[in-house]
Image: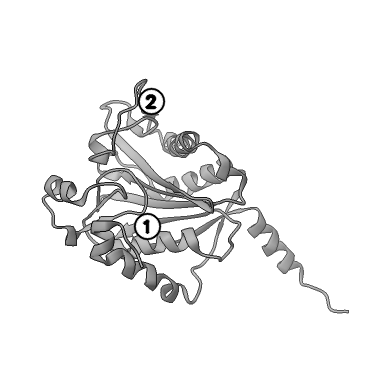
Amino acid sequence: MRTTPLSTFLVFEILVLSLLHYPTLSESGPENMGTDWWLFSTQEYPDQPKFRYYDWVGDEISFGYGQDYNWVERKTRKSIENLMRRPTGGGIVRHGEDLTYCLVIPKEHKSFHFPSLDLYESIHQSMKDAFSKQGLETELQPCMVAKKRGIPGDCFLEPVGRDLMTCRDGEKIAGAAMKRTKLAVLIQGTIDLSVLPFFNQMIFQTDFIENLALMIGEVPHAVSWPEDFLDQRMKFALEFAQMKWKRERKRN
């Protein structure tokens, strides 16, 4: 009788109880949005939460799904050709001196049912605890009694409830935006490194992932991009690069 190697059972157990952590990539805006959308829609490990950090190949500006691109052009003094609309909400974010991340929670996972504000707060609390381990004290922005109406404008100039702030100057450190469907939750978040004093970024990244995994009741587990990832991702990257997406929010 053939037997299955013990290592097979061990790998299976890890993947069943894991926050899957993908390698960091440094790419253009359309490629970054395409990769996040691939994680959001892929059938690879469809029941598992997924996470990644990523960089931008140059200074870029992204803006929220619901924002008017004409207003964003006037605000940033950039042409729409040089701007990137995200699939999540929120406002304008300037990239280049930030640490960006993506978290995907599928409907099959228990944390999918966390209320959005609770999830947002828990993510930033996980970040706050990671900074605290290095002696950097931060605080969560209180929620306003009367919530501001309308779409956020300039993300880091207009903090909202449960954003992460510096304690001393009250500057915004981190924010995020979400897209929730019947199938999954996509969170795209960023940390403004320019307002922070020196800290060990590699240790922070490890601590933050571990805190996130604990928050959703899992353990982090590093996985590789599949061999055909770039081919799978190409369709999404091309769609996010098109003007009809940037202007009209329309994808093929």
Residue 244, horizontal then vertical, whole percent: 26, 63
Mark 2 nearby-residue class (10 Å; few <14, some 14–19, many ≥20): few
Q: What quarter of the picture does the N terminus occupy?
A: bottom right
Query: In this rendering, would 48 be left or right of 204?
Result: right
The Cα atoms of the two marked residues, 2 and 1, are separated by 29 Å
Amino acid type shown at disc 2: Cys
Say if mark 2 contacts mark 1, CB within 8 Å.
no
Residue 163, horizontal then vertical, whole percent: 36, 34
Residue 171, horizontal then vertical, whole percent: 26, 32
Query: Is label 2 or label 1 in front?
Result: 2
Residue at point 47%, 38% (across, down)? 116
75 shown above or below 5: above
Residue at point 33%, 32% (across, down)? 160
Sequence-wise, the earlier of marks 2 and 1 is 1
Q: Which residue appears farthest toward the bottom when viewing the image?
A: 1
Query: In this rendering, would 214 be left or right of 61?
Result: right
Residue 206, horizontal then vertical, whole percent: 48, 49
Amino acid type shown at disc 1: Tyr
Residue at point 62%, 51% (across, down)? 108
Mark 1 nearby-residue class (10 Å; few <14, some 14–19, many ≥20): many
Identify the element where label 2 is drawn.
Answer: loop
In the rendered image, which residue does mark 2 sit on? 143
199 shown above or below 149: below
116 shown above or below 141: below
The label number, if any, that marks residue 54 in the structure image: 1
Query: In this rendering, would 78 be left or right of 202?
Result: left
The residue lying toward the viewer, choosing from 55 and 187, is 187
